[in-house]
Image: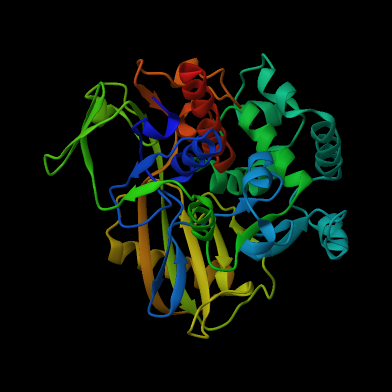
Amino acid sequence: MSKNSKNIYIIGAGISGLITALELEKAGFSPTIIEASASVGGRVKTETINGYVLDRGFQVLLESYPKAIKHLDYTDLDLQELVPGAVIYSNGKQQTIGDPLRNLALLLPTLTSNVGSIKDKLSIYKLNLALKKKTIDAIFNDKNNTTTLEYLKTKGFSDTIINHFFRPFFAGIFLETELQTPSKLFEFIYKMFGEGLAVIPKDGIQAIPNQLKAKLKNTTFLFNSPVNKVEEKRIILNDGTVIESDITVIATESAKLLHTNTTIDWKSCDTLYFTVENDTLKKPIIGLLADASSIINNIFFTTSIKNNNTNKDAVLSVTIVKSHDLTEKELIKKVTLELDTICSIKTKQFIKRYQIKRALPNLKSVKYATDGKALKHSETIYLAGDHTLNGSLNAAMTSGEDVVKQIVSKFN
């Protein structure tokens, strides 16, 4: 039986599913991707509402991700760079800190800010140097299994800079406010920030999966086809259709499909979009609300970078990580008040709320890659996704590569 005659199905057209298909094509296979929705992307989606291009949740690409460099065409994505720093709102003040080595304009405000002490700023410099020298393998092979918070305290950082910078900044990345994420992932993400910029494609974050889809030449797509169950050598769709499969790769949460109890613990967030009277920051930089009483974690003017909006209003993205029981009306009211009183931002119109219940996998142990065995559920069923490694786009891509290595070795 030739490779082309193998019936290989991938469930899920997210990043890991698309990379799985790309790697299978390189190995000579012609897979089929079954996707429940009408488009590719999974959790990496963009939509246009009344002329405003909105990502489903504020998301950035770290341009130094090794797998992103390997699989993406950055020029074609027309990546828009964010300023390597943050504006911090706390105790009625607004201060800017950042990396002056990459943006000289950040030198004076960083040195004069009271977000942290001189000792804290020196500790940041030392951490930058240490992680620049530390390899990714060394980071993930480290036997130290501490949390991010414990790690920062061990490095000598004060409560002031932890609470006013590290906590809100990384809460926006890890989607949890207590910094309980494993320190290995903190080191990796911090290293990636140090080696490159945070960027957003001009067409929105979905330009990434759209580009990956465009690279596929021998892959078939079945959209609007939710799967009910996966068994050995067959897939059963919600409408009762039975698909015979030699190999099935589940590139999404597998518990419901396999009817097992090994569910994924997910972290959630809220993202709200508003039109506002004006862009108060005047540059593409993230704003952090550091006061413990604030429900808002971070903000970003999406119109501070080139975009495809047909409306010319300034648009603000607001991210909420803290759990709450507010109704949407109450949430909008509270967010609008905080933007006005803390950030001096006047909202004009509420555009859209994205309540993202499955934003990131909540993993107590993280890995950079596997030998593939953990991705093998059975002789004909394999697993892929960032939940198998760590919550990042880089991990989603890595898992796609790793699972294909297992499949290729099986047929060879």
**For residue 94, above or below residue 35:** below
* Quadrant into which the N terminus falls: top left
Q: Which of 209 and 312 lies nearest the eye of the viewer?
A: 209
**For residue 212, above or below residue 141:** below
Residue at 48 percent of width and 53 percent of height:
213
Residue at 36 percent of width and 42 percent of height:
32
Residue 314 appears in which quarter of the rendering?
A: bottom right
**For residue 371, above or below residue 245:** above
The picture places residue 328, in percent across and down from the top left corner, at 29, 62
Residue at 77 percent of width and 45 percent of height:
194
Q: Which of 218 and 118 lies nearest the eye of the viewer?
A: 218
Q: Is residue 347 visible?
A: yes
Q: Is residue 91 visible?
A: no
Give the left or right position of residue 105, taking residue 154 as reference: right
Q: Which of 203 and 372 lies nearest the eye of the viewer?
A: 372
**For residue 227, above or below residue 201:** above
Give the left or right position of residue 113, taking residue 262 as reference: right
Q: Which of 84 and 381 lies nearest the eye of the viewer?
A: 381
The picture places residue 179, in percent across and down from the top left corner, at 56, 35
The picture places residue 380, in percent across and down from the top left corner, at 34, 20
The picture places residue 46, in percent across and down from the top left corner, at 44, 62
Give the left or right position of residue 358, taking residue 207 as reference: left
Which color mode does the image show? rainbow
